[in-house]
Image (cartoon, rainbow, N blue to C red):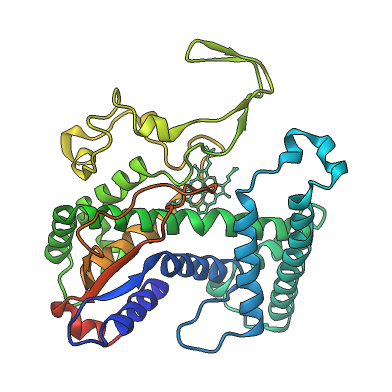
Amino acid sequence: MDEVKSLVGRLFRSTSKGSGEFQVVEMKSMFFELTLNVMMRMIAGKRYCRDGEDELEEEKKFKEIVRESFQVSGATNIVDFLPMLKWVGLNKIEKKLEILQRKRDEFMQNLIDERRKLTSSNSCYEQNSKTIVDVLLSAQETDPDYYTDDTIRGFMQVLLSAGTDTSAATMEWGLSLLLNNPKTLEKAREEIDMEVGQSRLIHESNYERLAYLHAVISETFRMCPPGPLLVPHESSEECMVGGFSIPRGTMLLVNIWAMHNDPVLWENPTEFKPDRFLGPGLVKNGFTFLPFGTGRRGCPGESLAMGLIPLTVGCLIQCFEWERMGEEMVDMNEGNGLNMPKAQPLVARCRPRPAMMNLLSQL
Ligand code: HEM
């Protein structure tokens, strides 16, 4: 909640300068910084994106590592397909990855060492301020062969790359869809005004009563799933899938984008219709809607994401008025990258809602 409040406060400060005029805001980086702060606070108890304060050297280094990691994560490495090209010097991506990995390891190791020092020197260390690194370090005490520093660094990196861009991209797609469908935005706001009011921000405890907001998020996941092919799975035994015999050891990619947009399964799949997730028409067969995958290797971050995304999008609807940059629709094309990013970062016009000014000025 702290981080969502901080995002809302930051947006308020940057949009309340004019005399009630709409201001242009770029939302992609705002969402990304929000999810980066949430993850890094959980992992190591630190935030790296702070509003209005001078950037520390450590913050600069961290942002550079994150930027480089995302740049190379979706890149095609031609040497994977034609290994002999390595000998003619076409392995630049591999070299880049090696350098990046060294930088990442050094950075993560410093964080581990810092937490190790802090927890061992602080005898009245509070249980509820434990980070993921602290938990892994205490597991290291009982099982040092498994929980090595190397493994802990790996955990940190996986959580960071799986938990930031996915949630940020969903918020960006969701707000873009709402800007292109202002009546839906209005309906979601009416629900929030009725169930939460205007004297406090949405809280997770209100979720049960915000069915339409959740339907908006589900419809966003249906149309723009951030893991469109899940992650590659491998058959551990020979099996039959949809009448095809799949040998043991086959790599299986599940195209959930195609499933979520299949006209046989969904009426008018290209239309943004959150109502399809409400009431008796609710999708009953869970295997037609799998934004987080399923089974043993399904996403372990689902509840975290489903705590954060409705909260963020809901607070933005509750506190601000939103408009597209002009008559033209927000561009909904996809760019390159693992998590189906938008081709163009979302830029919109935004101003605080008069009814929320009192609350916003206290943030
Ligand atoms: C909008 C948010 C998110 C979406 C749509 C999403 C989606 C997915 C999908 C589709 C998979 C592959 C599942 C499969 O193949 O069956 C996955 C795996 C994973 N996700 Fe997420 N995720 C999100 C947020 C998060 C967050 C916040 C975290 C971390 C806290 C996280 C951590 C992971 C990890 C560690 C895996 C690998 C699990 C494994 O291989 O066993 N994800 N996610």
User: In percent of the image, x 22 and y 67: which residue is there?
Assistant: 322
Image vertical order of residue 57 relative to residue 290, above or below: below
Residue 150: % across, % down? 78, 58
Would you say 140 lies left or right of 133 here?
Answer: right
Q: At x 18% / y 63%, what residue is drawn?
A: 192
Q: Of 2 and 320, which appears nearest the observer?
A: 320
Q: Is residue 185 visible?
A: yes
Relative to 252, say whether 80 is above or below: below
Is 7 situated above or below 70?
below
Residue 319 location (% of width, % of height):
23, 73
Task: Place residue 247 in its image quadrant.
Answer: top right
Q: Position of residue 285 (x, y in %)?
A: 33, 28
Asked whether, in this view, residue 150 is left or right of residue 219, the answer is right
The percent coordinates of residue 159 (x first, y second) are: 59, 57
| Image quarter (top left, top right, bottom left or bottom right) of the C terminus | bottom left
From the image, which quarter does the N terminus lie in? bottom left
Report if residue 147 is visible in the image: no
Q: Is residue 98 left or right of residue 119?
A: right
- Residue at coordinates 19% horizontally, 52% vertically from top-left? 181
Q: Residue furthest front?
A: 88
- In this figure, what is the number of numbered marks? 0
Q: Image quarter for residue 12? A: bottom left
In front: 264, or 210?
264
